[in-house]
Each structure stands twice: as structure tokens, then as C-alpha cells.
Image: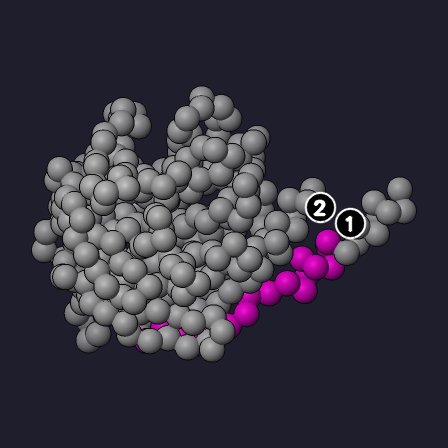
Amino acid sequence: MITRLVSLFVLTFSLARADWEPLAPLPAGNGGFACGFVEGRLVVAGGTNWTDDTKHWLDAIWSYDPNSNTWATIGKLPQPCGYAASGVVQGKLVIAGGSDGKIAHRDILTVNAKGEAQIVGQLAEGRIYSCSTAYQDELYIAGGGTDPADLKTFTATQHWVSFSPDGKTTVSEGPRLGEVGFGTGTAAAAWKRVFVFGGARSDPTTQVVNLDTVHVLHASEPKSTLPHAIRGITAVPVNEYYIYLAGGYPNDETGFTDEGFVFIATSGKFVPAKPLPIKSMVHLATDGEWVYCLGGEDRKKHRSDKVWRIRAQELLAPVIVK
């Protein structure tokens, strides 16, 4: 009993003192980019930002060195690309679809630690605002639209991008996730399953309706819903069984949020967790030990350049205490 009380005290104290550590900012404000750890460096590719009320679609590739806390520009994408599906697969950052603001791209790219981008395949049609995650050496893609300016093109399709040892890229399609098209949600893998969270659908009256759905691949259980409907939320696995979700845009009254949750994959439950250091549609990435919070849309027509990190284990303190 005493041991249990001491453990609870230590964990509660850890939760109280744990905070996001500020790091060197991005070279420029950015949101809607692809990111992930490649050979120990955090790679950021593409994205969007605003200057003088004008939206810019970016093609730069940046790399962050955790040892020196510095950013460097290491390359360029073949064309500007924002809001693409992405994930780290077989040691490279894979980027599928996205847009330059005019059309939705079909290209599938890989980016290595040197910033070298290579087109390795194509989707059947352009895709933007989809949910995506790396899973078992494949890139999983759900939903998204074919027109960056028309949410009515959102679909409920699923695709898997796989890579053979000889470098061949294969795109396969799975069953639809229901009948209602969606986008701007998030996906993450845990407990040998892929989970797709939230997002939004097109609506003829209000134009956009946020969703509280949780789709589970590879198993019918556990069935669950988010604590509330939200789009722009971001997810990152913090270990084999838990996923941290945070940020996004619940509604016009709330605006952007910093609210965080830990999703317990084995039960489908959500536990309130450490909030983000900013109210925003952020990007989250992990090297296994640390969870990084980068950039994102923190207000309309604006992108943040702020970067923080926190130990992944500290995000799990409320789950362990509970």
C-alpha cells in the first residue's frame, strides 16, 4: 500500500512539473507540412504560410539536429506541396498527394536524410487533406479530397502505399470507411491496429461539419468516439498501446485549442492529458523518447514557427495514475 502511494505521488509530481521544452524555431512559420524522423534528424517538407494576406505553398525541405538544436535547409521538393499524406517508411519520409494550392497532386515522393526528394509512384487521383500514418512498412491513407478548394470532393476511401525490395511502389485500395466522405482528421497506429480520428465532412448548409468518429482497422473492437467533434487534431503514438492526440479546431466558438488526450488503444477510452504549449493545428512527431510539437495554424491566415518537445513518458502520467 505504501509503495502504491509513493508511486502515485511520484507520478503526480512528475505530471505537475513536466512541461514542454522550447526549441529553436522553424526557419519560417509553417503548417500543413510533412514531417518525421529520418536517421536521427527531424525532417520537415513543404507546407504553407501567409504573408501580407497571401497564402504561400512551400517546397523547402528542412532538417533539425537535436544535438545542436539547429535547423538547416537541405533541399527542395519537385513542386510546392501542402496537406499531403505522409509517414516515415523504411527509413525515408514518404509524401503522397498534397497540393500547390491549385490542384491536388498524385505524386508519391520519398525524402532521405540528405534532403533528396524522389518521385517513386503515383496515386490513381490527386489527394489532399487525407488522414495518414506509417504502419508495418506501408503508408496508410484515409479520406481526403481531390480538389483543394472543394470539400464536396472528400471521399471515404482507404489506400495503402507499399514498397518492394526492388524499389517498386504499389498502391492498393481497401474498403470504404462508411459512406460519408471526410478529411482533415488524423491517424496513428497502436496495438497492431490503425486508428482514424475525427476530421470534417462537407455540409450543404454550414459548408463544414466536424466529426467525432474513431475508425478501427484490423479489428471491430474497441468501438469509440472522440470526446467531442473536431477537425485538425493531430495524433502520435507514445508507445505500443497509447496514442497522444491534441490541438485542432472544435468549433467557431472555441476556435483553436490546446486540449490534449491520451487514447488507450486496448479499451477505446480517452483520458485528459497534458495540453499543447499552443492553441493550434500543430504537427506532432516522435523519435521514441521525445514528442515534438511543431508550427501549425494558430490563428486564421497565420502559421507558427514555434517548436517544443516533451518526453513521451511524461504524456502518459495521467494514464498510469488513473
Q: Residues within 10 Å of mark 2 (few under 14, many from 20)?
A: few
Kindly identify the residue that appears in the image at 12 percent across and 40 percent down: 125
Residue 181 among those drawn in magenta: no
Mark 2 in CB contact with mark 1 (< 8 angstroms): yes
C-alpha separation, residue under disc 2 versus residue under disc 1: 6 Å
Which residue is at the front of the view, 266 or 322?
266
Residue 19 among those drawn in magenta: yes
Q: Which mark is residue 321?
A: 2
Q: Is residue 214 visible?
A: no
Q: Position of residue 225 (x, y in %)?
A: 46, 33
Which residue is at the front of the view, 43 or 116?
116
Q: Is residue 170 above or below residue 244?
A: above
Residue type at tag 1: Leu
Q: Which residue is mark 1?
A: 8
Q: Is residue 18 left or right of residue 112?
A: right
- The span shown in magenta is 11-27
Q: Position of residue 124 (x, y in %)?
A: 13, 37
Q: Quadrant of the N terminus?
A: top right
Mark 2, secondary structure of its residue: helix
